[in-house]
Image (cartoon, rainbow, N blue to C red):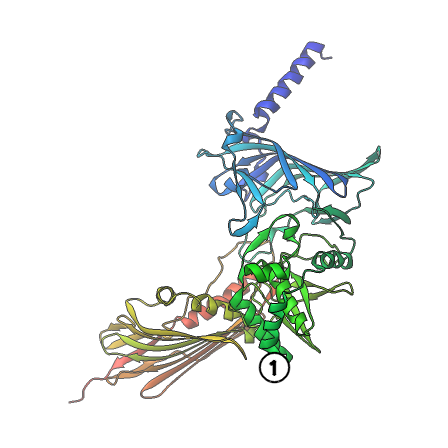
Amino acid sequence: MFNKNFIFGLIVLLFYESATGQGYSCYSIPDSLKINATSVLRFEENILTVKSISSATYKVHRVVTVLNKKGENSGQLVLQYDKFIIPSDIKIVVFDASGKILKKVKDSEIQDYSIEESSLFSDNRVKHYKPFVNVYPYSVEISYELEFKGYIGLPGWIPANQYNLSVEQSTYILNIRTEAEIKIKELNFHSEKSTSEKDGIKTIQWQLNGFNAIDEEPLSPSLEELTPRVIVASNKFFYDGYSGSLESWRTYNDWIQSLNEGRDNLPELTIQKIHTLTDTIKDLRQKANILYEYLQTRMRYVSIQLGIGGFQPFTAETVDKVGYGDCKALSNYYLAMLKAVGITAYYALVIYNPGRPIFYHDFPANIYFNHVIVCITFGNDTVWAECTNKYFPLGYLSSGVAGHPALIVTPEGGKLVTTPKSPAESNLFTRKCEIKLINDGKGEIKMETTFSGLRLAEGLGKYVKSPEDQLKNLYEDISLIDFNIISHKYYYQKNESPFIKLKAVINCNRLTTISGQRMFVPLKPLSDEIYIPEKVEARKTPFIIDFSYYDIDSIVMLVPQNYDIESIPSNSNIKSEFGTYDLSVNSSDAAITIVSKMKLNTGVFVSSEYDRYRSFLSDIDKDENQKIILKKITATK
């Protein structure tokens, strides 16, 4: 039996270990948690207390061990806040591998800056601290509290929030007062859970122990689809003087509708102006296009992130006066112009994400939509308008928006839809080349490339630059050695099957290789290298091809007069569920004609198909990198 002095001494020792970090010696991490890990979440406790529809607190305490340089991000403090989320009691302590204190961070050492550098108006800020430690491993203990003075969204729980991060222990505690209406969605759930209730407060606790790091693999889904996660939302909320509800998409629609109410009034002079522009036009789509171009020429995009201003647009009158706005304000302004000429259109919330966005139809929450566009209806026809881009044609949506969930906001309760996405055959890149081969290995190239469909944005990115930058980028884009661009010019057909076209003339001093009597000519001198994702042994995650496209290359290669064609590649045809590739090579006495067509399909594929996908791309790459062999004609005696 232990005596009291021994027990007291043990308590003091345990307290001292906790207080000094000795309990988080890096040497005590189980070997299993180091597999694929660049950092380990040693301990974490997150406590969210929802007091009412307008008040909540969130306490965080965590210890992370950074195993190597690649894990540095997980040891940083990155704390976003604004006037409705107030941070306090921030403490940061850095420990060496044995748990000895290296540094207690002072408040003055924590950076504090605006998170929206591109915003004209923003109260979103971030507190940031990065430990400057160059000896690994080391540990960082971070704690802080957030007070929510009104909210629309609430912090959930995603303990393994980075690839290659293991979790030794993480706890999420949710305290809910009875007047708060909280809903919960659990995903990839492998943790312990308990529920209790006392004095009108319901407490739910989740705990995750011994979670091995997920290794990031090429073309993986987002980490949120793979790791344990709890999403929390309130059916009712109060934010910056406005009450709202997330009980359903209809109630969320109604809240957005109420924020926009009465904000689509234009000055009388502007109404007269747009009538002057459109009254003689009978076709409604043509009218909408005239007003769209009027918007593009008069207005510029700025980001607005001020309280309810992150959700409510500037009034149309304000935008008309100042000449700028964010996606909400410019969309609202365009809607006001359309309304003035009798065209039916709607405000639409959408997800902007270059990859595949996560969306749960059965869980309305303020975690999805981050952009606003306009949906115009002409009878049974629907046209979408991106109001923040000065160059897009009416009806064009970039790959960041196309094919993504959207909420069309209507007086009837709204409608969840998916924005249109063009098939691979429409996302077209075509290149036509006439290549004149010269005896000494040089070549003259006349090139014409065209971008259309979702590839239009790619072409626009080149077209909108200054002539000097156009030329600079063209030099960077062309995969030749020792060449000069003699001339280049871009053309933009904005309406009626829009496309960007580039014409260029290029002289290349090292187009072919000459060895003895033979000239070795690249089959496709201007083609970019096929991207083949790296090999993964025993791949675990599915892989995603999230952008479909179609490339067509047509080349006419003029053979020098004193050379014969000795060898040309064979025709090729490759088909799979990932796409198709066709190569046709034909020759005459004076010319070789090469046509290649490559189509890539979108899809989500199981991990076991990954090697087949790599083989599909490798086979195409081999075909693309073949050589044509010409042989010098020897004069007969």
Q: Quadrant of residue 364?
A: bottom right
Residue positioned 68% across, 44% down in the render? 155
What residue is drawn where x is 78% and y is 48%?
A: 236
| Front position in the image: 216 or 631 | 216
Drawn side of residue 566 relative to residue 408, left or right: left
Q: Quadrant of the C terminus?
A: bottom left
Q: Is residue 580 left or right of residue 242?
A: left
Q: Is residue 367 above or below residue 493?
A: above
Q: Position of residue 371 (x, y in %)?
A: 62, 59
Residue 402 screen position, x and y as percent: 60, 66
Q: Quadrant of the N terminus?
A: top right
Residue under pointer 1: 281
Is disc 1 surrounded by few (<14), some (14 to 19) or many (20+) residues within 10 Å? few
Seen at 77% across and 57% down, the residue is 251
The answer to whether residue 594 is left or right of residue 74 is left
What amino acid type is highlighted by mark number 1? Answer: Ile
Look at the image and tell me whether residue 423 can be seen. Answer: no
In the image, 490 versus 27, the foreground residue is 490
**Residue 512 is drawn in which quadrant?**
bottom left
Q: Nearer the viewer, residue 616 or 187?
A: 187
The local secondary structure at tag 1 comes to: loop
Above or below for 253 versus 555: above
Can I make out residue 165 in this image? yes
Tell me how many marks there are: 1
Q: In the displayed structure, would residue 25 be above or below residue 129? A: above
Residue appearing at x 55%, y 75% in the figure:
426
Q: Residue furthest left?
A: 637
Q: How far across and how far down the image is residue 70, in percent?
A: 49, 43
